Amino acid sequence: MLDKIKRLPFEKILAFTSVFVLIFIIGLATYDKVGKSDVNVLITLESSKDPFATLPQIVHDSIMNVREVDKNRNEYVVTISTRRSRKELLESIMDNKSVKDAKIHHKP
């Protein structure tokens, strides 16, 4: 087997290797895009908490956008890009002591 590979021209070995690497990279990029979904979560923080310091600690997935809903009640709509289910995401957010309430937010 090794003798057959040694007899192949360098260009063919390079072409096979390049195609393999290209297919591998395309597969990784596809996996990264296909498995994620954007979820909007309405999070109500405790009144004493700063959202800029607290939200990145609460949400361990990628935060895409934060929009203030009501400053007096400390409510924010956070768009999160995640692979987790909505239920798992809400449970992980609610486990934090800085959060009063969290629920899925549907855009009007």
Image: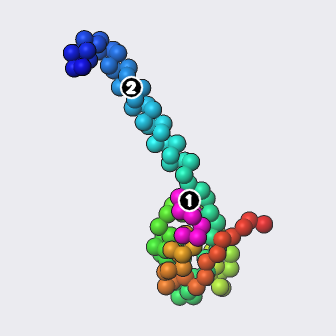
Q: Is residue 71 above or below residue 32?
A: below
Give x and y (percent) for residue 55: 52, 73
Q: Residue at x 33, y 14 (%)?
A: 11
Residue kind at label 1, given as amino acid type? Ser
- Magenta stretch containing residue 87, yes or no? yes
Q: Residue at x 61, y 59 (%)?
A: 38
Q: Quadrant of residue 101?
A: bottom right
Residue 18 numbered mark, or none: 2
Please tell me which of labels 2 and 1 falls first in the chain: 2
- Magenta stretch containing residue 46, yes or no? no
Asked if the residues shown at circle 2 and circle 1 are in contact, with their CB atoms under 8 angstroms apart, the answer is: no
Element at label 1 = strand
Does residue 68 appear anywhere in the picture? Answer: no
Residue 93 numbered mark, or none: none
The CA distance from mark 2 to mark 1 is: 32 Å
Q: Residue at x 78, y 66 (%)?
A: 108
Name the residue that disc number 1 marks.
81
Give x and y (percent) for residue 20: 40, 29
**How many residues crowd around disc 1 within 10 Å: few (fewer than 14), some, or many (20 or more)?**
some
| Quadrant of the frame with the N terminus | top left
Specify the color scheme.
Answer: rainbow
Q: Nearer the viewer, residue 17 or 52?
A: 17
Q: Residue at x 35, y 15 (%)?
A: 12
- Left or right: residue 21 compared with residue 1: right
Q: Which residues are magenta?
A: 80-88
Element at label 2 = helix
